[in-house]
Image (spheres, rainbow, N blue to C red):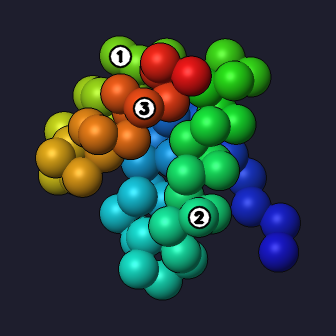
Amino acid sequence: MKVRIYSPAKTVVDCFKHRNKIGLDMVLEALKDAWRMRKASADDLWRYAQDCRVATVMYPYMGAVAHE
C-alpha cells in the first residue's frame, strides 16, 4: 500500500500508537530507520510522542536507539 509521509517523526509515533496492530518489530524498525537516516530528530519524536500520549511507551526505545 502506498502511503504519503508528511512528517517522518509523526509517522514513527503513529506506528507506536498502533503497535498492537502492526507489530513491535515493525515499529522498532521504523524508529531505527528514521533515526539512522536522520529523517526525525529526538525533539520532533518526543514532541509528537507527548501529543499522541505514547511518550511513556517510546521513552525506553528512544534511549536504546540513541545509544546504538
Quarter of the image with the N terminus is: bottom right
Mark 2: secondary structure: helix
Q: Is residue 39 visible?
A: no
| Sequence-first disc among 2 and 3 | 2
Label annotation for residue 25: 2
Q: Nearer the viewer, mark 3 or mark 1?
A: 3
Residue 64 image-quadrant placement: top left
Instruction: Please provide percent x and percent y for residue 6.
Output: 63, 39
Considering every residue shown, the one lying at the far bottom of the view is: 21
Instruction: Please provide percent x and percent y for residue 17.
Output: 35, 63
Q: Amino acid at mark 3?
A: Ala
Quarter of the image with the C terminus is: top right
The residue identified by callout 3 is: 64
Mark 3: secondary structure: helix
- Left or right: residue 64 versus residue 36 is left
Residue depicted at x 67% and y 17%: 38
Q: Is residue 4 visible?
A: yes
Closest to the observer: 53 or 33?
A: 33
